[in-house]
Amino acid sequence: EAAVTQSPRNKVTVTGGNVTLSCRQTNSHNYMYWYRQDTGHGLRLIHYSYGAGNLQIGDVPDGYKATRTTQEDFFLLLELASPSQTSLYFCASSDVDNSDYTFGSGTRLLVI
Amino acid sequence: KTQVEQSPQSLVVRQGENCVLQCNYSVTPDNHLRWFKQDTGKGLVSLTVLVHENDKTSNGRYSATLDKDAKHSTLHITATLLDDTATYICVVGDRGSALGRLHFGAGTQLIVIP
């Protein structure tokens, strides 16, 4: 069954720590996205990608890097984590015309 | 500036009652609009997508309308169940293409009580 799988489900790190969030999709979609969700806000786009090796900057990219190693795999990197990055992170994939959008189950990150 | 506004922010209904959730937006162009259901701490699950002016969709106990002139959508849930307790998120896509961006509302938190 086609899906978007995120790991880990939960992560705790200290301020200044290094964190990598992983996302894999089996939908054969070209496009993948990283969002963060915070109370009182809609999902906000961090980075997205059109395909392997491609990276596009989203609306809230500061403090985040991303890398798309294959069509299936998209990683979000926090190299110097800060408490403001405590959030619920979602990965998603979509087809070319955005008619099919699939979200992962989320990664809850706590930076202490 | 928030381009997708949802109301109410939260809503409590008794099991079996009907409810209506509202979504107003200013996104231009407005290619399509989706309603998602998000259980607490979980991912977003698509309920329905509306594309055309005055579109109406139905998916079991969920039905939705879209008025592109008014830039307004409603999600109706009939005969609510306890499992309907969730956050419902309105999302507007500004293009039906690779250049398209999604604009998310903050959600309506629905609580269904016995």
Image (cartoon, rainbow, N blue to C red):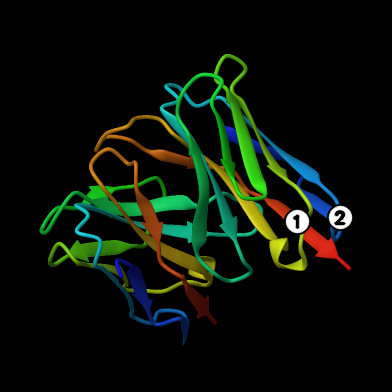
Callout 2 crowding tier (Cα within 10 Å): few <14, some 14–19, many ≥20:
some
- Return the x and y of residue B38 as percentages of the image width and height: 59, 61
Residue B63 visible within the image: yes
Residue at point 73% right, 55% down?
A: B109
**Mark 2 touches mark 1? (CB < 8 Å):** yes
Q: Quadrant of the C terminus of chain A?
A: bottom right
Q: Is residue B80 above or below residue B56?
A: below
- Return the x and y of residue B48 as percentages of the image width and height: 52, 44
Q: Please state the chain letter of the residue tagged with numbered disc 2 in the rendered image.
A: B
Q: Quadrant of the N terminus of chain A?
A: bottom left
- In space, the residues marked 2 and 1 are separated at their CA atoms by 8 Å
Q: Secondary structure at mark 1?
A: strand
Count of number-bearing discs = 2
B40 on left or right of A9: right
Q: Secondary structure at mark 2?
A: strand
Q: Which mark is residue B13?
A: 2
Residue at point 40% right, 79% down?
A: A16
Q: Which mark is residue B110?
A: 1
Q: Amino acid at mark 2?
A: Val
B2 on left or right of B46: right
Q: Please state the chain letter of the residue tagged with numbered disc 1 in the rendered image.
A: B
Residue at point 19% right, 59% down?
A: A28
> Looking at the picture, do discs 2 and 1 lie on one chain?
yes
Residue at point 34% right, 41% down?
A: A99
Mark before the other along the chain sequence, 2 or 1: 2
Q: Amino acid at mark 1?
A: Leu
